[in-house]
Each structure stands twice: as C-alpha cells, then as structure tokens.
Amino acid sequence: PLIIAAFVLFQTDCNKAVPGTIYEYGALTLTGEEYVQFTKYSGKHVLFVNVATYCGLTAQYPELNALQEELRSLGVVVLGFPCNQFGRQEPGKNSEILSGLKYVRPGGGFVPNFQLFEKGDVNGENEQKIFTFLKNSCPPTSELLGSPGLLFWEPMKVHDIRWNFEKFLVGPDGIPVMRWFHKAPVSTVKSDILEYLKRL
C-alpha cells in the first residue's frame, strides 16, 4: 500500500515580523447583540479557537472550559469561533449552537465559560479577516490539507486551517505567538502556554 508521510507538528511559532495586531479586528458575539473590538483584550493572552458542535473533537470544549478557568488569573482569555467548513459539523444557526452544546455534544448541560462569536468562515473567499491575519502570521502545523470531500471552501491555500479546533495564541501586545494542530491535546496547549508565560 502507498504510505504518504505527512509532516505534522503539534505546535508552530508565529512570525512576529508580519505587520499588524489583532486590535485592528473584531467580531459579533454569537447572539449578534454586541460587536466586540479586540482592543477589549489588550494586555491579555488570547487563545483563538475555531469550534464545531458535531465534531469528533467536540470533547475539547469541556477541556477548554477547564483551561479558561485555570489560566484566567494569568490573563488568558479563550475565544471560540463556530465554523461549518470542516465536514459541515456546525450546521445550526447561531441561535441553535448553545442548545446543541448543552443537550447533544458535549451534552449533559454543558455551557461554555468563554465567549463565542457568530458562525463564519475561517478559510476561503469569505473568511473572517481576523483569521486571514492569524494564518498569515503563523505557519501551518501540517503539510496536508485533508480530504477534499470534507473541506468546504475555495480557494485552498497552504496556510489554511486544517480542521475544527485549531488554536492560535496571541500575546498581550496583540501579536500572534503560537499555532496548534487541531489534534494537539488541550493539556499540551496548556503546558505550552504556561512555558510561554514563564519566558515573559
């Protein structure tokens, strides 16, 4: 059988020479009631995550809750961005996402303790500008994009997000620091963040 060796890293460091910061961007909250300018998070360590309710990795949601709870006192803020571009695993309307999380996956009454924003694209022609910036700043963690039949955007680019639950850490100056592969355990993400905070 043909075996394709793919280069995969759990984490890559971002290029700080890319001009700009996250403070030039913002997003609507999941309810659509508030536009949040990311200057709100000035001085914080912000973890951007593209999320989905009906994904095999949705089990990361409770782990992200725990990470937010444990690292909040250190100035870490988790932000979630629902997206339906990977396997169509976020099919609901904005108004349906929280109930899907509460009753279906992860279920059991789960409520995220971090801010969720409106569902939108993270890749392709209509990608949210904040993700254009994050991807341009941080090299991809995998050479392979994935199965084309499960990826719903065009054009496809080398820096594109590979799947639900990729993560980007941004420093207190608004400049991206690290990017994680979607399958990187949240425990690994947490230990990487703690190591990074020690170096500051």
Image: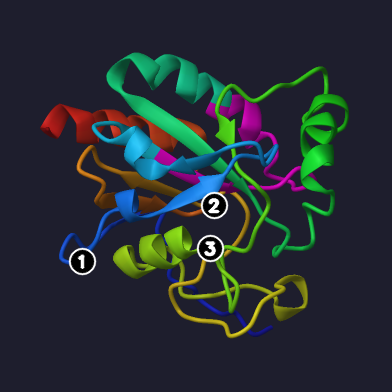
Real-space CA distance between mark 1 and mark 2, rounded to the nearest whole angstrom: 25 Å
> In the figure, residue 159 lies in which quadrant?
bottom left
Real-space CA distance between mark 2 and mark 3, rounded to the nearest whole angstrom: 19 Å
Report the quarter where the N terminus lies: bottom right
| Mark 2–mark 3 CB contact (< 8 Å) | no
| Mark 3–mark 1 CB contact (< 8 Å) | no
Which residue: 77% across, 30% down?
106
80 or 62: which is nearer to us?
80
Q: Is residue 171 above or below residue 182?
A: above
> Which of pointers 2 and 3 lies earlier in the amino acid sequence?
3
57 or 101: which is nearer to us?
101
Q: Is residue 131 left or right of residue 107?
A: left
Disc 2 designates what residue? Answer: 182
Q: Residues within 10 Å of mark 3 (few under 14, many from 20)?
A: some
Which residue: 21% across, 67% down?
18
> Which of pointers 1 and 2 lies earlier in the amino acid sequence?
1
> Which of pointers 3 and 1 lies earlier in the amino acid sequence?
1
Q: Is residue 56 magenta?
A: yes
Under mark 1, the amino acid is: Pro
State the mark number for residue 128: 3
Q: Is residue 136 left or right of residue 49?
A: left
Segment colored magenta = 47-64
Which residue: 40% across, 54% down?
25
Residue 181 lies, in percent from the top left, at 48, 54
Under mark 2, the amino acid is: His
State the mark number for residue 29: none
Disc 1 designates what residue? Answer: 19
Q: Is residue 83 left or right of residue 168?
A: right
| Mark 1–mark 2 CB contact (< 8 Å) | no
Q: Is residue 63 above or below residue 172?
A: above
160 or 148: which is nearer to us?
160
Which residue: 65% across, 47% down?
118
